[in-house]
Amino acid sequence: MSYRVLVLHGPSLNMLGQREPAIYGSTTLKDINARLEAYANAHNTTIVAQQTNHEGMLIDWLHSAVDTYDGVVLNPGAYTHTSVAIRDAIAATGLPVVECHLSNIHAREPFRHTSLIAPACLGQISGFGWRSYILALDALLGHLRARDQNNS
Ligand code: DQA
């Protein structure tokens, strides 16, 4: 099976490389997307990666992923901790979504310990720097393969 995966990066992730490198590392978003692309190509998968600083844009992209993508890797940035709207959008799509964070949100400030989107997601990967994205994509592909094998 080949799969199509949408990768969504939320606010301030366009600043990776220069944004708080002690927390987020020095890898740029462009590099992360290139590494994801290489991993996807090696695993019979097509990815499209998009970044926005706007909550509504993330919601629009999630909605339009239905019928176009098999699943989503989503780092909602700070919206993780505030957005009922993104949580509801994920639930509305019915798509498998893996929540992804570079930093370990549970080891940081208390306001980051709660993810409002987690209950609507397949699972959460947090704390492995840029590798969180590869792990999240791998987890999503494992889920899709298992689902499709069980249905065949
Ligand atoms: C983040 C963690 C969030 O708490 C923070 O607001 C971000 C990045 C991460 O990838 O570690 O913007 O999602």
Image: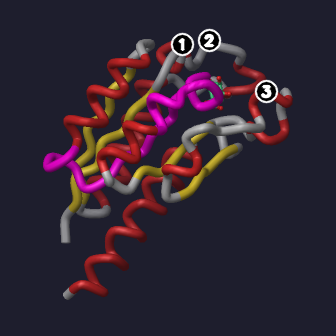
Q: What number is the disc on residue 146?
A: none
Badge 3 element = helix
Position of residue 113 in the picture relative to residue 121 (left or right): right
- Report x, y in % for residue 102: 63, 36
Coloring basis for residues: secondary structure
What amino acid type should be assigned to the residue bearing mark 2?
Answer: Gln
Q: Quadrant of the N terminus?
A: bottom left
Q: Quadrant of residue 129?
A: top right
Rendered residue at 77%/23% (across/down): 22
Q: What number is the disc on residue 111?
A: 3
Rendered residue at 42%/45% (across/down): 73
Rendered residue at 55%/41% (across/down): 117
Q: CA distance from mark 1 to mark 2?
A: 6 Å
What amino acid type should be assigned to the residue bearing mark 1?
Answer: Met
Badge 1 element = helix
Residue 18 against residue 106 in the figure, above or below: above
Q: Quadrant of the C terminus?
A: bottom left
Q: CA distance from mark 3 to mark 2?
A: 23 Å
Whether the magenta-drawn stretch holds residue 130 is answered as: no
What amino acid type should be assigned to the residue bearing mark 3?
Answer: Phe
Asked if labels 2 and 3 touch by Cβ distance under 8 angstroms, the answer is no
Would the CB of label 3 be found within 8 Å of ligand 1? Answer: no
Asked if labels 2 and 1 touch by Cβ distance under 8 angstroms, the answer is yes
Position of residue 22 in the picture relative to residue 75 (left or right): right
Span colored in magenta? 66-87
Circle 1 residue: 15
